[in-house]
């Protein structure tokens, strides 16, 4: 009676590290909650600098996600469906920003798109367009680090999709663009959504590439993570408040999309 | 349908080469004619169909539908309707939107396409399922939606890949009859792939048998059923089939090991066929001696419905016999038993090879 069946009990050798891992992930968040200046939270949140940073973060992460979708979905389709020499190399290159330290990414962006950069100099002289230290620069930096998440997710979905649906659409008279728009894309929609969520979350938390490429100007390029970093040196309480806001936004988004995300991740 | 159709209907020669596989098939179908491609697994039936649809590249040949060569055209420009084996209805679209997909691609407006689609759904008896998603449809309903979707593009050629294979036995009967009706009402040429002889017999006007990528026999269902020309076809239609030389009403099989007397007066290379039910089995040599009598060993005894199929082993003259369960008991038939087998000359059927 006292003994449960042996198969049902998880072994301690797995359970202990599991609990330790969970604690390691959750305790810092708990620390944020404990140390938050709850009494002054309302007034601190309403400060213009916080609201500006939050607005800029949401705006730039959303714009970066849109840019990732516009460029990344076709890129994923090409990697999944077009046979060309060097496809493995291209696939590896696409994932480089995943492992590259974001600061290095920021430096690289400066070298190419900076005012004296390879492309940036030409853009400046020909069109008067400059990216560094602008909100557009923030969006570009976030797009650079976030796009691999989208491409990998969508490419996985495309590879798993049944090609015969596309054949069926072709026999019904659909050209390749119509097949993509009306059959392929709806079939991989869960994968695209999962990729977009990952992409958005990564863009929202982006720090290194942003501060390197776009700088830290309040209202223009200072996103939430940058504001947290800055506040930590001058006003640690404010840093905690900003962190809490980021935490809340992340949790809400993940909770809203978690099922879909977990089900389709490959 | 008259035999001379000019350049109307389908006239194709399909050459497909792939590693370890080689298809070379001449195929015609008159407008309104239903041709069944019948063959064992891996014979190239589906490949032939996919080549017609433009889904596999051809190494040679041509595909003419109503005089126009479709081979250079991509699948979406061929004007062909195709029903796939597991239907491949788009899971994110309703039944109506699935059927409207083709007309939309042909340039019809949204409303016009939906009107056409609603008309086809009504014709296949699924008007009330217009807004249902494919996963909410039964196998038989999905098959009908797939047929409606293929017909809604007003194709010059209709292709059906194992249209009944995914259905259970009961639904299959019902859908087969419905499919036969719709095929009869279709004005263009139709090519059907199946490995089920019954589907082919019921649905097709003409049967083309393929083995190893080559045409081995073709004819009307009745002709193919009566005059099988390969072991595969003979097994499908349930006949014992041998090849031999006929002379003066006697057919010599193999190297003269066995002769069968017939009532046909053909001479030369022939096929000789007889039904398993015309084979009589005896434990001891029968009196009154029917003329075609041989000794064989029982290789297997299998129940088939209310009959028992007995496989007789006597190379190169293996045969099957259908007897009643009572006869099996009476003769004490089991694997390895030695029996006398007999078939009357009047029960054999001889035709030129």
Image (cartoon, grey):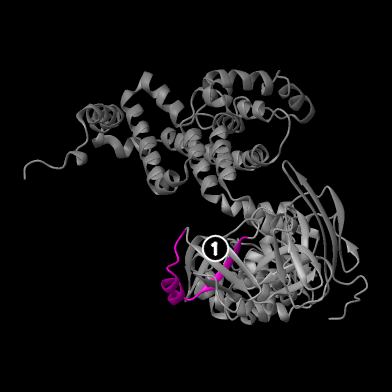
Residue drawn 72% across the image and 72% down it: B261
In terms of image quadrants, where is residue B69? bottom right
* Residue count near mark 1 (Cα–Cα under 10 Å), binned few <14, some 14–19, many ≥20: many
Residue A100 visible, this angle: yes
Identify the chain of the residue marked 1, using the numbered disc in the image.
B
Is residue B268 placed above or below B326 in the rendered structure?
above
Horizontal arrangement in the rendering, residue B208 relative to residue A29 (left or right): right
Q: Give residue A34's position: percent from left, percent from top.
A: 23, 31
Q: Is residue B278 magenta?
A: no
Horizontal arrangement in the rendering, residue A237 relative to residue A56 (left or right): left
Depth check: B51 or B215 in front? B215
Residue drawn 63% across the image and 56% down it: B315
Q: Give residue A173's position: percent from left, percent from top.
A: 75, 61
Residue drawn 48% across the image and 38% down it: A198
Residue interval drawn in magenta: B318-335
Q: Which residue is mark 1?
A: B311
Work out which quarter of the rendered image holds the N terminus of chain B and state it.
Answer: bottom right
Depth check: A233 or A261 in front? A261
Horizontal arrangement in the rendering, residue A49 relative to residue B12 (left or right): left
Q: Give residue A76's position: percent from left, percent from top.
A: 63, 39
Residue B103 visible, this angle: no
Horizontal arrangement in the rendering, residue B45 relative to residue B87 (left or right): right
The single residue placed furthest to the left in the displayed view is A1
Q: Secondary structure at mark 1?
A: strand
In terms of image quadrants, where is residue A126? top right
Q: Give residue A121's position: percent from left, percent from top.
A: 74, 21
In terms of image quadrants, where is residue A182? bottom right
Is residue B214 placed above or below A207 in the rendered structure?
below
Residue drawn 58% across the image and 37% down it: A151
How many numbered discs, if any? 1
Depth check: A76 or B210 in front? B210
Q: Is residue B326 magenta?
A: yes
């Amino acid at each position: 009676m006292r003994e449960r069946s042996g198969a049902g009990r998880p072994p301690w050798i797995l359970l202990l590290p599991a609990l330790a891992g969970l604690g390691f992930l959750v305790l810092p968040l708990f620390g944020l909650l404990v140390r938050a200046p709850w009494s002054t939270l309302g007034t601190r949140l309403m400060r213009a600098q916080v609201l500006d940073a939050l607005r800029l973060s949401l705006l730039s992460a959303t714009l970066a996600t849109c840019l990732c979708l516009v460029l990344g979905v076709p890129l994923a389709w090409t990697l999944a469906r077009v046979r060309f020499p060097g496809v493995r190399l291209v696939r590896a290159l696409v994932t480089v920003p995943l492992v590259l330290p974001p600061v290095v990414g920021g430096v690289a962006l400066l070298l190419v798109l900076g005012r004296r950069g390879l492309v940036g100099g030409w853009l400046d002289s020909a069109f008067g367009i400059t990216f560094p230290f602008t909100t557009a620069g923030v969006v570009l930096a976030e797009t650079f680090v976030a796009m691999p998440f989208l491409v990998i997710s969508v490419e996985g979905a495309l590879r798993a999709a049944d090609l015969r649906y596309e054949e069926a659409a072709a026999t019904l008279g659909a050209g390749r663009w119509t097949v993509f728009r009306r059959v392929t894309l709806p079939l991989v929609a869960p994968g695209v959504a999962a990729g977009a969520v990952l992409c958005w979350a990564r863009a929202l938390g982006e720090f290194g590439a942003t501060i390197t490429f776009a700088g830290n100007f309040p209202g223009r390029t200072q996103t939430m993570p940058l504001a947290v970093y800055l506040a930590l040196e001058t006003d640690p309480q404010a840093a905690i408040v900003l962190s809490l806001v980021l935490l809340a936004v992340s949790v809400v988004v993940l909770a809203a999309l978690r099922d879909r995300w977990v089900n389709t991740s490959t | 349908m008259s035999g001379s159709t000019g350049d109307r209907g389908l006239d194709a020669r399909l050459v497909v080469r792939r590693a370890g596989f080689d298809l070379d098939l001449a195929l015609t179908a008159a407008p309104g004619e239903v041709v069944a491609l019948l063959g064992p697994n891996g014979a190239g039936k589906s490949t032939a169909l996919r080549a017609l649809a433009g889904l596999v590249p051809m190494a040679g040949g041509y595909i003419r539908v109503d005089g126009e060569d479709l081979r250079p055209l991509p699948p979406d420009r061929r004007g062909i309707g195709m029903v796939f084996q597991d239907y491949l209805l788009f899971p994110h679209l309703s039944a109506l939107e699935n059927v409207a997909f083709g007309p939309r691609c042909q340039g019809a407006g949204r409303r016009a396409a939906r009107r056409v689609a609603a008309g086809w759904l009504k014709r296949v008896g699924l008007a009330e399922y217009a807004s249902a998603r494919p996963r909410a449809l039964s196998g038989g309903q999905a098959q009908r939606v797939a047929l409606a979707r293929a017909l809604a593009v007003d194709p010059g050629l209709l292709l059906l890949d194992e249209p009944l294979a995914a259905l259970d036995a009961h639904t299959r009967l019902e859908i087969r009859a419905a499919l036969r009706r719709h095929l009869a009402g279709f004005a263009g040429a139709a090519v059907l792939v199946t490995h089920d002889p019954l589907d082919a017999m019921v649905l097709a006007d003409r049967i083309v048998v393929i083995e190893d990528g080559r045409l081995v026999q073709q004819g009307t269902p009745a002709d193919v059923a009566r005059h099988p020309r390969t072991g595969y076809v003979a097994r499908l239609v349930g006949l014992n089939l041998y090849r031999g030389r006929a002379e003066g009403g006697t057919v010599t099989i193999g190297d003269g090991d066995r002769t069968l007397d017939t009532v046909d007066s053909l001479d030369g290379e022939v096929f000789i066929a007889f039904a398993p039910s015309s084979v009589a089995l005896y434990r001891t040599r029968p009196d009154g001696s029917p003329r075609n009598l041989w000794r064989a060993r029982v290789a297997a005894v299998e129940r088939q419905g209310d009959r028992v199929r007995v496989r007789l082993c006597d190379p190169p003259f293996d045969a099957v016999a259908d007897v009643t369960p009572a006869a099996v008991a009476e003769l004490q038939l089991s694997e390895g038993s030695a029996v006398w087998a007999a078939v009357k000359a009047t029960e054999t059927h001889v035709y030129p090879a």
